[in-house]
Amino acid sequence: MTWRRALTNGGYGSSRRGVSRLHQRPAWSVVGFFAVLPRWAPTACALGFLAASATYGIVLGGHGRTVVENVTSATGFAIDQIEMDGLQRVAEFQILEALELHDHPSLVMFDAEAARERIDEIAWVDTASIQKLYPGTLKIKIAEQVPYALWQRGDVISVITEDGEVITDEVDGRYANLLRVVNHGAQRRAGEIMKELNKIPALRARVRAASLISERRWDLNLENGVVVRLPEVGISKALDDLVRMDAESGLLSRDIVAVDMRLEDRVVVRLSEEAALRRKAAIKARPRRGVGGADT
């Protein structure tokens, strides 16, 4: 009795037994929101953290654009074709240099606006446009500058537009037939003299240069070296008179160096030195006549 009661009072009776260990929940078990997370969530979070860390490192190191470009290029968006339209004086290699393409460039990451601005800086380019045609084509259209005349100031000669803008200082034989305007300010007024000369094609073909004198009037330099000094006003009439005299007497083909058309009532012709000497000798050789008209 004493031993059995002691066991009962010691707490070993069936009324005090706990739940079986197989059914007990550990004290550290997950509760609340985390209890409903799928089993793969921890792995996904770890991978996401690694990816975020790698992305951060790439961006921090300045390699983000390179990585994106390589990925998009490898997935079928590499630039593999370039179409160019409108090139006459601009060389293809100049356009390619302005595009600044490297190996396996991506059409997605290509900065068309920046490339267009670089192309606009090429001497002969007036306007340019660039289209990105997916998956891998660049289409470039160029409108070139139109050469109008040559402008000379000192020893420098440039090809200019009709508005007087310099296109390039690289002048070769292709532009030999362009009118050359000389002196400062002549580039802005080239259209003025060109308009008058174009009315008389036969004379225009004989003019190699037009010099602006004191920014007021023009001198024409003909292919045979004769200089025609035009008036400040009334250029059309002066040119008409010049052509008429040349047709009647071959004025511009004579041994002269200058024709001065600046006076309204007369034309002054300057002979060459040889012609002047011949004329002086011819005058001296003329027989003198006396007062009564008899030879002396």
Image: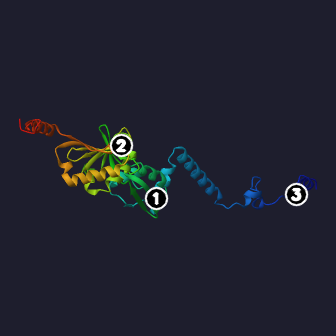
Identify which amino acid the numbered label 2 is placed on. Answer: Arg
Q: Residues within 10 Å of mark 1 (few under 14, many from 20)?
A: many
- In the shown orientation, is residue 254 left or right of residue 61? left
The span from disc 1 to disc 2 (Cα, nearest Å) is 56 Å
Mark 1 or 3, which is nearer the eye?
A: 1
- According to the picture, the residue beneath numbered tag 2 turns out to be 217
Regarding mark 1 in the picture, which secondary structure is present there?
loop
Q: How far across and how far down the image is residue 260, in percent?
A: 27, 42
Could you tell me which residue is drawn at 20 percent across and 49 percent down?
251
| Residue 16 tag number | 3
Q: How far across and how far down the image is residue 174, in percent?
A: 26, 52
Choose the circle earlier in sequence order: 1 or 3.
Answer: 3
Identify which amino acid the numbered label 3 is placed on. Answer: Arg
Q: Is residue 280 above or below residue 200?
A: above
Identify which amino acid the numbered label 1 is placed on. Answer: Leu
Is residue 205 visible in the rendered image? The answer is no
